[in-house]
Amino acid sequence: MQKDSDARARFEALLTTDDVPLADAALAVAAEEYPALDPVKYIARLNALATRVRIHAPEPARAGTLLLAIRTVLFEEERYRGNDEDYYDPRNSFLNEVLDRRLGIPITLSILYMEVARRAGLQLQGVAFPGHFLLKYAPPGGPEVFIDAYNGGEVLSSDECVARFKAASHGRPVEQRHLAAVGPKQILARMLHNLKRIYLERSDDIRLWWVVDRLLLLEPGQPEELRDRGLISARLGAGTAAARDLQSYLEIAPDSPDAAQVREILANVRSRTPMMN
């Protein structure tokens, strides 16, 4: 629909690496909204936070000591916290804003926590827990420990995670996959899906388009995202782009429940777009 932005090109390039650098990729997402964003500045901030963590946990630091030190630096000294007052503010989903405002939501505070921990020498994993993203430390041969970055770095057992989920979901059972580790691309997708819901609710098609576009860079050919990008393009008057995505959607999912409706929209788009083949 539009010429590739520098932010889009950087995000796409980062996805080609074997081990996607999570903080860099999150900042590349934010750079679409903040074109003047300097990623080097924010990576330096993460490095500085990790240095302070190591001061609180001198070598040889055990995992428990590092977890306590991260909690001290991020939540006691720097006072990062969850934004209960305006949870759906889109700024909560941009890592640069989280670092600047010290406010975030579970996914972005978890990215912050994980990236500081990694730089301090502790490898954590993301956990796509339903409704509330978590982190976990999985020592070899030992019990997994879960961390709730939204609630001040609170440490939880797997049983406590299960109990909280059951209480919030009126007894619905937790599946094992809910406690499984997820990689950087899945973490970025969850962050982008949060933004997608926000911009959809606000009917902000310009921002909605680039968010869906980034989701398709993460996983090309997703039928739902192809359809949505096509529908957004149609609303924005980008007929050629809309037709391309809607046609691709119908080829991938010809028997989808909304196929007839999408075919009708596609026909209307083609009728309004000159020189459309």
Image (spheres, helix red, strand yellow):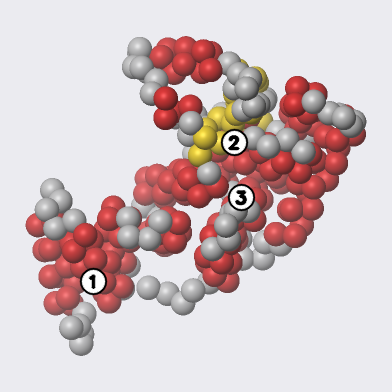
Q: Earlier in the sequence, mark 1 or mark 2?
A: 2
Residue at the spot of label 2 = 125
Residue occupying the point 61% across, 65% down: 35
Residue at the spot of label 3 = 22
Residue 4 appears in the rendering:
yes
Please tell me the numbered disc located at residue 28.
Answer: none
Q: Is residue 189 above or below residue 267?
A: above
Quarter the N terminus occupies = bottom left
Is label 2 in contact with label 3 (beta carbons under 8 Å)? no
Q: CA distance from mark 1 to mark 2?
A: 40 Å
Residue occupying the point 46% across, 77% down: 3
The image shows a total of numbered marks equal to 3
What is the three-letter code of the residue carrying label 2? Answer: Gln
In what element is the residue under mark 1?
helix
Place residue 233 in its image quadrant.
Answer: bottom left
Q: CA distance from mark 1 to mark 3?
A: 33 Å
Is label 1 in contact with label 2 (beta carbons under 8 Å)? no
What is the three-letter code of the residue carrying label 3? Answer: Leu
Determine whether, in the image, residue 74 is placed left or right of residue 242. Answer: right
Estimate the x, y position of residue 110 in percent, counting from the top left.
Answer: 61, 36
Residue occupying the point 63% across, 53% down: 21
Residue at the spot of label 1 = 243
Q: Is residue 36 above or below residue 3?
A: above
Residue 87 appears in the rendering:
no
Estimate the x, y position of residue 247 in percent, counting from the top left.
Answer: 20, 68
